[in-house]
Image (cartoon, rainbow, N blue to C red):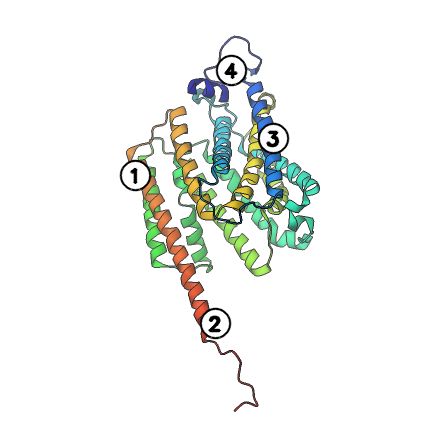
Amino acid sequence: LAHHVFGLLSHSAMPTAPTPGTKAGPVQIHSAFWYAVCIAVVGLIFMLVSTSARPRANENEDQSISALAPLVVTWVAISGGLTWVNKLIFAPEAHGGFGFPYVTLLMLWHMFLAVVFSNIIRFVAPQLMPAAAKNQVTFRMYIKNIAPVGVCLAGSLILSNAAYIFISVGYIQMVKSCTSSIVYVVAVLVGHEVFNIRCGASLFLICSGVAAASFGELDFNIVGFGLQLSATFVEAVRLIILKALVSSNGIQLDALSGLYYYAPTCLVAILLPFSLHVDGAIPWDKLWVLRPVLLASALIAFALHLTILVFLKHASSTTYAATGILKDVILIASTSVYYSHPVTSLQVLGYCASLVGLNLFNRAKEMNQIAKQKAKELAAESAPILRKGKDQV
């Protein structure tokens, strides 16, 4: 059964007899399967939009994973599915992929579809985009505050997806576990955070785990590692800029309004490397053959934005992070089986160490926030209720 499913996903293990799928040279596509995936994802998008429009039935914002089981399964399937599909697109045909490693073109297509769908939602269901519906963002505000974030997002998308060409999916998930540590380090360097010894010890454990996973990687590639690390750094810069803009200018963008403004910026930013042909000459005939797969990839990418929006509406960031770990474990296991890329014991040990360090880091951050809140409360209690005036003795 698993062999048959993997055969549907890619062109490997397909019969040589004529099939309804599309053919172009050695690549064979099960068009019916991929169009069925597209129809299912479109139905999911409509369901997510209607779910977002409805008020919460449960006022508890931090529901357990078991209470959110359908949403957890949906998010894991969509997020993991996007990684699977993109890896299949980039992977060589000899390794069970489609041999189409044109990252900027795929990201350009993703952003184009995101612009189309976000504008449709903007006019069909404006209540889902309060900031965009009220036109709170002026052109000057867009250029000054939103454009830098959108450019960083474009860079992060291109670099992180390019890494899939050189290194395995499982190893990428391991490297991504150090994202929070890089965000923290950059924030400390620019003065947005104050260094804490507990956070520092946690970061050391996370980096040690990633280093162990790197040493245990059988097919380590310095280019892929550099691309993924650069993508993580750019993503850290994006998050810090976004936090600084929100705190200093009071810009409050909901998730869909943010996508509504960021997607066109990303589209324009990706046009630059695309126009420079950084991916090389694009085989347009092969692109046409892969149209159902590329359409499915873009639809899944947009559905992922909506799934995250609905997920965070019903769960806390802690629950979101826990399900992210579950998704990473499933991705590591499934891709290592499909691509016959074993995970070494040193990598398992390193990944577990990174997860422990990540948990300790989150706890240290929470303790810092609690300490700051208590300090503010004590300062407020010790402050005089009335200031002494000039006429008072």
Is the residue marked by circle 2 packed among few (<14), some (14-19), or many (20+) residues within 10 Å?
few
**Disc 1/disc 3 C-alpha distance (Å):** 40 Å
Residue 254 seen in render:
yes
Q: State the residue at coordinates (55%, 32%).
A: 300
Q: Closer to us: mark 1 or mark 4? A: 1
Q: Mark 1 belongs to which amino acid? A: Leu
Q: Mark 3 belongs to which amino acid? A: Gly
Please state the horizontal and vertical placement of residue 96, each as a whole percent of the image: 45, 21
Please state the horizontal and vertical placement of residue 379, each as a whole percent of the image: 45, 72
> What residue is disc 3 on?
43
> What residue is disc 4 on?
26
Q: Mark 2 belongs to which amino acid? A: Ala
Which is more toward the observer, 163 or 4?
4
Q: Closer to us: mark 4 or mark 3? A: 3
> What residue is disc 2 on?
380
> What residue is disc 1 on?
349
Q: In the rendered view of the protein, which quadrant contains the N terminus? A: top left
Label ID, residue 385: none
